[in-house]
Image (cartoon, grey):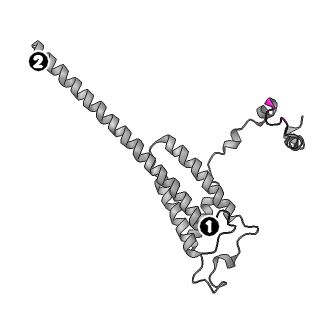
Amino acid sequence: MSPADWASTVSAVFAGISAFVAAAAICVSWRMQNSQEILNQAVLSLERAYRSLTQDEQQVQPPAPDRLNWLTAARHIERYKKLKAKLTIETHRTVCEEHEEYWRHKIYVCLDAPQQLALSYYSEKLQPERRAGIEPRSALVVHEFAKWPEGREDPIDEVDAAAIVLRGDALEGNYGLRQYLESLPGYRG
């Protein structure tokens, strides 16, 4: 092989490697951007679910027994689940779960009426001014979403309370907390 052929071959190999690296960079960038867009829409779906259920009110307890509001909220929750499943970047999945926990809490508080919601809340027969009762599947979707998911680890379980107490920062100037902890068997002394 002549030096010119050898140089030509090396040049072609480097060009191929450069093209591969450029394609990989574009692919990674596209994947990251696509996952970010899915994350943004997933979070928006959760926000819309809450706003649909509460009719854009800040603190509604319980939400109005409006069939359309419950259906819309449930649809947003179901779309959220599909979007969450499409997230490809681990960081985006973690961020998504943080948003999910926030909106789960908001919906839980909204549904946490002083008493359990009665049959009359859901049923059209007991409230004739309503055209139809709450659609059963939408009620199930919303109530299920509001509960802590079975099998999900609770980050509080990993907290070393004894170490926090030993450091003392949390108790500094916080006499009520100190007294409260001392009243509990696991925190005395």
- Answer yes or no: is residue 149 visible: no
Rendered image quadrant of residue 58: bottom right
Toward the viewer: 86 or 33? Answer: 33
Q: What amino acid is at disc 1? A: Thr
Going from the N terminus, do you reach mark 2 or mark 1 first?
A: 2
Which element carries disc 1, helix, strand or loop? helix
Residue at image position (76%, 67%) is 114
Residue 27 screen position, x and y as percent: 34, 39
CA neighbours of label 1 inside 10 A, class few (<14), some (14 to 19), many (20+): many
User: Taking 72 as reference, is 171 above or below it?
Assistant: above
Which element carries disc 2, helix, strand or loop? helix
Compared across the picture, whether 165 is left or right of 37 comes to right
User: Taking 55 as reference, is 163 above or below it?
Assistant: above
The reply to whether the magenta stretch includes residue 21 is no
Magenta region: 167-173
Residue at image position (63%, 86%) is 129
Residue 82 screen position, x and y as percent: 47, 56
Compared across the picture, whether 93 is left or right of 103 comes to left
Residue at image position (71%, 64%) is 112
Residue designated by label 2: 5
**Outermost residue toward the bottom in this view:** 128
Residue designated by label 1: 54
